[in-house]
Amino acid sequence: MKKVSILMISGLMIIICAVVFWQWHVYSKDSDKPAEPKEELSIIASVKVEANQLRVKQTFQGLDANRKYEALIPAQVSEIKCTDAAGKPCEDGVAKLPKGKDIQFEYMLKTGSGFSLLLNDWMVVLKDADVTKSRIEIVDHYNHKGTWAAGLPLKGFKQTELLHYYVFEGVNSNPSLYWQEKPLFKLSGQKEIQYYTSQKDQAIYEFDSLGILSGQHLSVVITDGHRSVLGNGLLLAGNKLTDKELERKMAIALLASKFETEMGMEGFTLETLASLVIKQEPENAKSKSMAAELRNTLSAEETVDFITYFSEEEHLDGSLLDEYLSSIRGMNTKFFLQNRQENQAVYPLLFTDSRSVIVNEMESDELEVVVRGDKHLFPLVPTLGALGYKTNIGTDFNVMEFSSDTRNYHFNLKNKTFILNGQSFGLLENPFQYIHGEWYLEKYWFSEIFKVEITENDDSFILES
């Protein structure tokens, strides 16, 4: 029996060793396989300058061959056609793009005549495509003088009697193009900033505040006058701007390149962020109010943390800004999303508690508790509605009436009194807070006036009437 046991154990050990060796061999073979390189989507655009027009050949390389893309065509484009990598025309013009790793577009851009030209949003864009690199080659046979600039770094330039040849290359999926008849000299500034100026001995501007806005290229063209124009990766800045004005314009331009959505066009949002970086008062009225909300609500440490975040991030939008503000406080806010419309009053920087609200054993998704300092403010009308009250608020906001099956309240805020079921009471202060069109009541007053029992735990506020 002892020999049989030894034989069985030995056999099992051999089997186990064989299985382990086989698994190791398979793993080793898989590990030896080189990792599939991730395709990087790039753009190569060849621009040929002709009389009153540009002839463009734009190629997307490194596309996902299994994905169908949607092309967004600029309004100023004409005579557009599309081909795949083999030169086969796209079906229905550019409405249906073929699958494949490369797609090429050819089109015309009308430019007209004049002493200068600025083109924004002139390139074909593929919706939801993450372009990692762009290269623009300009061949100018037509203009015998003048200079081209772009919202990309200048990598090469060659001039002969017959043509001017430029190569711009960098990270920007739709950089602006600029030409002017008056010759420009390129001068290198701090980090990713290039200056184009008609004066070869132009003083180079160095702003310490812009050092934190790293990683974003900006071409600054110094023009005559006081006017400034913001492009994509490019800024036209008048030579009569003060140093502070130029610093603000450049900060806004560097921040604008981080926003790929329509928010990037909201100058008041960009000016708000720029004012935090350069420590200047914004010019725009809404920007002033938004910046004041941020400065007055966030601590000095939180402000520095927020500035560092949006300065170093490559891609931003309103949701990301709100998410980071929320993470700083550990509470929720929609400050930037709620302030997207310039013609609306500034929505205050409010943080809401992430905990749920349960009223009489029913969870309410629409109730959000605002946190101000150490106070918890409940939205008055919806909270009372969940507790079974009907509400009537006078147009002058001096009179409020709330009624349930057992209680009737009549408040006169002007006199700081209220009547409960026919009995009068006085108030030492107005318990209600009016914040951006909505009334709120602090947790303490809900208990004192409406006799609502409020308890809380790590997950929720629990209200019982």
Image (tube, rainbow, N blue to C red):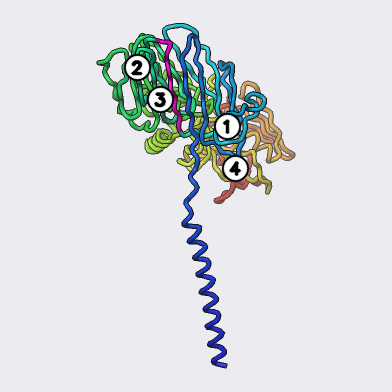
Is label 4 in a helix, a strand or a loop? helix
Region in magenta: 133-143
* Tag 2–tag 3 contact (CB < 8 Å): no
- Mark toward the start of the polypeptide (2 vs 1): 1
Q: Nearer the viewer, mark 2 or mark 1?
A: 1
**Residue at position x 55%, y 81% from top?**
11
- Mark toward the start of the polypeptide (2 vs 3): 2
List the residue tagged with mark 2.
Answer: 159
* Tag 4–tag 2 contact (CB < 8 Å): no
Q: Which mark is residue 447?
A: 4
Residue 309 lies in magenta, yes or no?
no
**Residue 353 % position (x, y):** 54, 42
Q: Nearer the viewer, mark 4 or mark 3?
A: 3
Which kind of residue does numbered mark 4 sit on?
Ser
- Mark toward the start of the polypeptide (4 vs 2): 2
Query: Residue 227's quadrant in the figure?
Result: top left
Q: Which mark is residue 86?
A: 1
